[in-house]
Amino acid sequence: MTKNRSSLLRVLSILLTMVVSFKASAQEKITLQMAVDRTLANNLTIKQAQVTEALGSADLQQAKNNLLPSLNASTQGGYYFGRSQVAGAFTYTSSTSLNINGDAQLQFTLYQGGQLRNQIIQNKLLLDVNKSNTNKIKNDLVLNVVTDYLQILTNQDLVTAAKQQIDLANQTLEKSNISFKVGNQTLADLSQAKAQLSTANLNLTTAQNQLDLSILILKQYMEMNPYTDIIVERPDISKLTDIKTVYDATEVIKTALNINPDIHLAEAQQKTYAQAIKLAKGYYYPTVSLYGGLASSYSNQLNRKLIGATVPAYEQIGVVQGTTTAVLSPIPVSQPIYGPYSAFNQIGDNFNQSIGLSIQIPIFNKFSNNTAVKKAQLNLQSAQLNTQIAKNNLSKTIIQAVLDLQSAEKQYQSALQTYQANKDALNVTKQRYDVGLVNSLDYNTAVTNFNKSENDMIEAKYSVVFRSKIIDYYLGNTITL
């Protein structure tokens, strides 16, 4: 019986190992670089910006195509039937007819106040705006991914710390139970130990929820199925020796103003509004166009064509008196002769051409041109202010980031010292508690202080890393861990 039980336990152990191994293999490991690459490749906000960029490219190509001439052709055919008045008479007749007309028109703009060229320049600037906006979105998302990735690492450490705190609370509760049974502790001491365990369990639940939420946010950035099981690779923060904590804010601002996508976007928008003024002023000038046309028509009413007339006939009306010479008189009306008139010949006979020059001179348009120029100038002023505001905000943000990094470094050093002191104090208190020299209240206070200092130290450690990476972001450096 014992042998069979041992075999069964061995089989169950193997099956459990296989299940755990399969689950681990099904999990996908995500590094920071993978998270950034997938976000840049899959994020819908980036794809939407790229579609807008493609639309801007199409507008630019169309502006260039507007320099080409336009050619249009049209045709119209109709079948007409019913009664109509006879021309020149007060009578009516019933008839049917088929009429077809066709024409082609060519138009080429010779001059339009420079608007065609200015429109090309403006659409090119607008395309630059769209590209700058795409780059801004990419940079912002990279920063968000790094921020969330570090938050995941922080939350993982907090979960680990919470589990360790539960183990410590369980040990304390076990010892309190033993001490309570032998009469060395009161019911209040036992209740205090139970409360400590409940608090540790609550802290674990909170930390786990925060971890799950931060992982979900990372999946959303990567446009990943939220139910996909992933493992976030943990870099060894302790081995990061390139974490710089001292920066000159002035130098960082100087570099950031030249490479920051927010500034590039504001400056690109400013250029488009400056170009819009030239475009609006173009409406003051005349438009000169060259045009030409071809046209012809066909009607089934003209299915016969006059090709001649009958030769006049003569008739004898008498003889010359005293002679036998006949006197002849022509028949007064000759008869027309008609021949077939094909559709091809009719179209050829009706074929006509035209060529000309068109000049449209703006004289008075209810001051709409003046208003357009004024609005363009005001838009430029607004864009210039937006650019300066963007530069000011960037400067303030960088100065604040440098100060935050310095403060985070000081907080980490302080939190590290506090953690080490509370760790030593807990060890001493635990030893004294085990031999009954310290009551449960003092011991629980030491545990609480240790737990809090450990959490503070973990958060401070990642805060230094994160704030240093923020400065790297503004300097245009690749963010790595």
Image: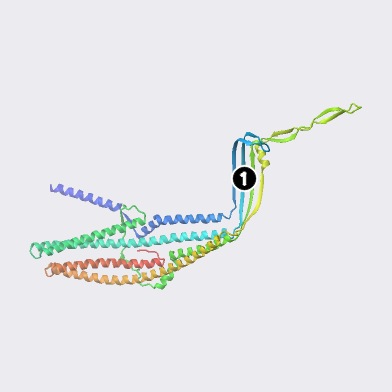
Direction from residue 305 to residue 282 in the image, left or right = left
Quarter occupied by the C terminus: bottom left
Q: Nearer the viewer, residue 453 or 428?
A: 453
Q: Residue at x 26, y 58 (%)?
A: 208
Q: Nearer the viewer, residue 75 or 456?
A: 75
Q: In the rendered view, would you say 384 is above or below 14?
A: below
Q: Residue at x 21, y 67 (%)?
A: 450
Q: In the rendered view, would you say 290 is above or below 400?
A: above
Q: Position of residue 382 (x, y in %)?
A: 47, 65
Q: Residue at x 32, y 56 (%)?
A: 216
Rendered image quadrant of residue 113: bottom right
Report the amino acid beneath label 1. Answer: Asp
Q: Nearer the viewer, residue 95 or 21?
A: 95
Specify the farthest residue to the top: 324
Specify whether residue 430 is in view.
Answer: no
State the residue position of label 1.
Answer: 103
